[in-house]
Amino acid sequence: MADDVDSDSDDEIEYSGMIQPPLIKQLQTILSEYPDDGQILKEIIQNAEDAGASEMKILYDGRPAVQEPSTKKAPFRKYFKGPALLVHNNAEFSEDDWKGIKMLYSSIKEFDKTKVGRFGLGFKSVFHITDHPVIISGDQLLVLDPHQDSSKVCQTMKLKKLHRYKKMKVDDCLKAFSGVFGFDQNTLESGHFKGTIFRFPLRQEETKLSDNIYDKSKVDDLFMSFKDEAPVSLLFLKCLESITLLREENESKTGDIGEIHFSVHIDKTTIEAVRSSRTDMRSQIQSLGNTLPLDSIRNSYNMKICVEDDVHNVTYRSWKVMNLFQGENSMSSTLQKLSKDDSLSYSPYVGVAMDMDCPSNFQGHVFCFLPLPLTEESLSGLPIHVNGFFALSQSRRFVKWPTADQIRNHTHTDKSIQWNQALVIEVLSEVYSSFLQEFVQESSNYEDLSAHAITVSQCIPDANEVDEHWRILFPPLVEKLQNTKVFFTTNEGGKWISKDQAVFLRSNKIPSGHGVESTIRKILEMYQQNTVEVEDHVWETLELQEQEEVTPDFINSRQKKL
């Protein structure tokens, strides 16, 4: 009976939300997952890329700017102190960008499959540098101040009305921004800045957020880490064409701030072709929305990258790049399901790039549009660079792979791990195969076909060098190359043939001495054999053991037949 009485009472359940830690504490947790290193600049580059910018500049401004402390009458003064690190790009914030930058753990770009930095967390790594990021774009100025009450962390102002905001001193803003990337008094009067500027006043003393004091030497470290990867930073991006580092250490300078310290850009000899190819593929992908194409979308281009340092030393590197967005008609049911999984929100997109100079010390690096931090985990062992919409670790430093225990116990059911494996097996194998075949077709552009054949051979991975996680590429790649003409013979003036048409010659398998090798070569030439000289790694990787090979017995049999 008592239970019945209770059930008819007017008492109501008490509901409440989870108690959230203070914003400062949440930011500290994020910073602990994002080391204070070159990854910070990559996060900012990714945001510029996602905004559709073609140019980006990063400036160390050593000027003190505003030195007076903040007061009750001028509380905004601390946001305009110097020295500072400033970043400019030539795209303007959209409404979604303004919303996204105010998000903490998620992002407005989270389910946009065309975006690189979709996760939102990465940008917060700038709090390693500063307590007060300031953003100017279009007609707005935004200050992020995590030390404020939670309802006042994001402070948005209109540029044209800056002089009308209570306690805002316009002169403080001009001391920090005037002469920087074209910003001046006229910008405030017009109320509009064409492009975007991020300004990060360097932390000069310990705060509740961080005890990480940031000075010129730490900015130098950031710059150095970028310069190390600069020659490949533009390879797989869809929009950015140049990135420039600048410095300003003349404390009294007031105009035309920043002298070029370092730059990387796509050379004028290839820029138009690269831009056209990128734009076309980007527009095709954007037109899909969140659907998949039935047929694959691909592009390829040759890219020459120019790097210039502070003493005007200029170096060039030439690359061949191919990108593929896999179509639904070419997918397994597993990849289709994963591609449509909103909890992943990844695109079946992979690219490859080969250094046309074929340096002997080349190391294949893994990219998620920008190169992952250079560690053993980010080196694939492949003879080309690989880019893809890979599922990464929380810090976005590593591709997710199953652990040794998961492999041993067959328990790697994490969907993000399944995604990475499917991306390598299906999409990477397809673009790798297409890359090799197109590279062969381009042989007509080369005078020395034998030299080009060696370059093609160098594109084929060495199973002994490839990291264990990437060896899942081999079976599907070998299958796709099964009947393709990727082997070069000098017979009949030089031609490309399939493996079934070839007689393979491995010089280290021919008896040495007494002119045996030269005699065998003369016999092969005399009887017009489709001889293909092949390196051991190609022999092993492409599983050529069942094919015809030049041996003394083979020579004897040919002589008997003829």
Image (cartoon, grey):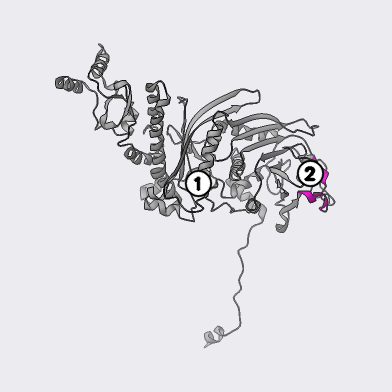
Viewer can see residue 135: no
Whole-angstrom CA distance, mark 2 to mark 1, is: 42 Å
Nearest the viewer among 113 and 5 is 113
Tell me the quarter of the picture where residue 503 sits.
top left
The reply to whether the magenta stretch includes residue 106 is no
Question: For the point 34% across and 30% down, which residue is it?
Answer: 538
Residue 295 location in percent, x, y? 41, 47
Please give the range of residues in magenta: 159-174
Residue 239 location in percent, x, y? 57, 40
Label the magenta part by its dominant secondary structure: helix
Which structural element holds mark 2? helix
Which class describes the residues within 10 Å of circle 2: few (<14), some (14-19), or many (20+)? Answer: many
Report the amino acid beneath label 1: Gln
Residue 502 location in percent, x, y? 27, 28
The residue labelled by disc 1 is: 284
State the residue lying farthest toward the bottom: 1
Marker count (numbered): 2
State the residue lying farthest toward the top: 514
Decide: is 259 above or below 101.
Answer: above
Horizontal side of 107 relative to 447 (left or right) equals right
Viewer can see residue 495: yes
Of callouts 2 and 1, the N-terminal one: 2
Tell me the quarter of the picture where residue 189 sits.
top right
Horizontal side of 23 relative to 434 (left or right) equals right
Which class describes the residues within 10 Å of circle 1: few (<14), some (14-19), or many (20+)? Answer: few
Report the amino acid beneath label 2: Cys
Which structural element holds mark 1? helix
The mark lying in front, picked from 2 and 1, is 1
In the picture, the disc for residue 173 is 2
Horizontal side of 505 relative to 60 (left or right) equals left
